Amino acid sequence: MRNSLKKRGTAILAVVFAMFMVMPTATAFASGDQGYLALGADLSGEEKSTVLELLGVADEEDYNVITVTNAEEHQYLDTFISSSEIGTRALSSILITENGGSDINVETQNINYCTTGMYKNALVTAGVQGADVKVAGPFEISGTAALVGAVKAYEQMTGETVSDEVLEGSLDELTTTGEIGEAIGDKETAEAIIAKVKEEMANNPDMTDSELEEAVREAANEAGINLSNESIDKIVKMLSNLQELDIDWDNVKQQSQSILENFKDLFQSEEAQGFISRLIAWFKSLF
């Protein structure tokens, strides 16, 4: 069972991604957009200064500023996590800007559960390109306020409303990735496995559950990880749910390949290749 900090940390990221998941184009930014700064409403003066410094913001007036209240956190997140986990203060904040390219760059400061790769994986699912995303807290916290800030920023940038289905899909992906990372003791490897399968899904978005299961097992084996049947079932269910969403699979493929560049050693290690060789030999023996 995850402790309360980890539960809240997992949820942080999902709404960041959810804000992009119904985008009509590859990026939510209009030409010349300043970018959006969403600040927790309960930050003290000193805490706010700390957060702005961590986000690299010299002047708030350079951005479209949004304030996120704790009431809004509960409004958006009570459906997915318990009220007690969300807490009573909105502190975490987020800065979203256009970077002029096609890559997604993610940085976190004082967000102590989900990794930047977990953010990026979900952003890939959303079809986001050309965005710099920074999330920060005044000290080590989970960051639920940043989630709500991301949703509000998205709605202002695009005029679109985040649907319940999209939000659930993002929460599902982030929560599942976090849970698998805990189960195997390595969140980065969990990211890599998810990215690997999503790359395969991009080539065949209509994969059946049995095909998804086979792809998950293969990716885990290549990474030298022995996933439990329960973990595999969770991943397959999550990926199957993603198939129901309107996703730009061409972008998923491109960005997944970019993510996997950081995991070349993982999927090409001697241990992994040795396992693959043994697996091939075993299949040959069947015939």
Image (cartoon, rainbow, N blue to C red):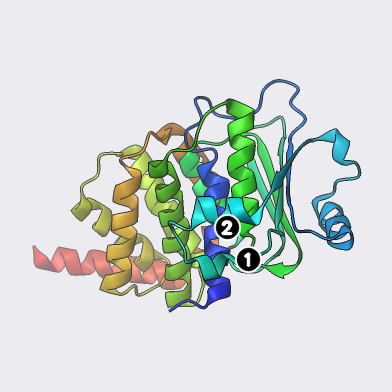
Apparent side of residue 4 relative to residue 246 in the rendered image (left or right): right
- Residue 47 location, x and y as percent? 84, 62
Q: Residues within 10 Å of mark 2 (few under 14, many from 20)?
A: many
Residue 121 in sight: no
Residue 12, by quadrant, is bottom right
- Residue 46 location, x and y as percent? 89, 62
- Residue 203 location, x and y as percent? 34, 38
Residue type at tag 1: Ser
Residue 30 in sight: yes
Alpha carbon separation for disc pair 1 and 2: 7 Å
Q: Earlier in the sequence, mark 1 or mark 2?
A: 2
**Residue displayed at 64% across by 65% down:** 88
Mark 1 and mark 2 residues within 8 Å of each other at the beta carbon = yes
Residue type at tag 2: Ile
Q: Residue furthest front?
A: 71
Q: Looking at the image, is 90 positioned above or below residue 167? A: below
Q: Which residue is mark 1?
A: 142
**Residue displayed at 39% across by 73% down:** 225
Q: Which residue is mark 2?
A: 12
Mark 1: secondary structure:
loop
Residue 130, by quadrant, is top right
